Amino acid sequence: MVSGGWLLLGMFALLGLPLLIGWLRDVLGVNTNRFYGDELNKTRRSKREKAFDKAAPYYDSGNHWGSDDGSSVDD
């Protein structure tokens, strides 16, 4: 019969072995599946940001009621 210590050690080995292999591949330079997209996408603008840029001239001219004096509707 297997004691609890050996069972726990076996579970740690099963969980830790993939992590150890991945770390070794990274250290040795074998890991070619790296993601550099974050560095490439820093200057890229999303569709939402482009839409906001197109709409900015309409909203920067004053409030939505057409007056440029900044007065509210309740005045």
Image (spheres, rainbow, N blue to C red):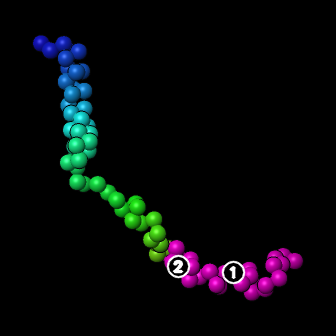
Mark 1 crowd level (few <14, some 14–19, many ≥20, 10 Å Cα) = few
Residue 60 is tagged as: 1
Q: How many marks?
A: 2
- Identify the magenta region: 49-75
Picture quadrant of residue 19:
top left
Tag of residue 40: none
> What's the residue at 71%, 84% (across, down)?
61
Identify the amino acid type marked 1: Asp
Give 13 or 69, whichever is nearer the viewer: 13
Which image quadrant: the N terminus? top left
Depicted 39 relative to depicted 53: above or below: above
Q: Amino acid at mark 2?
A: Ala
For this view, does 68 lie left or right of residue 45? right
3D distance between C-alphas at marks 1 and 2: 14 Å
Q: Which residue is mark 2?
A: 51
Q: Secondary structure at mark 1?
A: loop
In this rendered view, identify the residue nearer to me: 22 or 30: 30
Most extreme residue toward the right, as rendered? 75
Q: Residue 47's spot in the image, x, y percent?
A: 46, 75
Q: Position of residue 28 (x, y in %)?
A: 22, 43
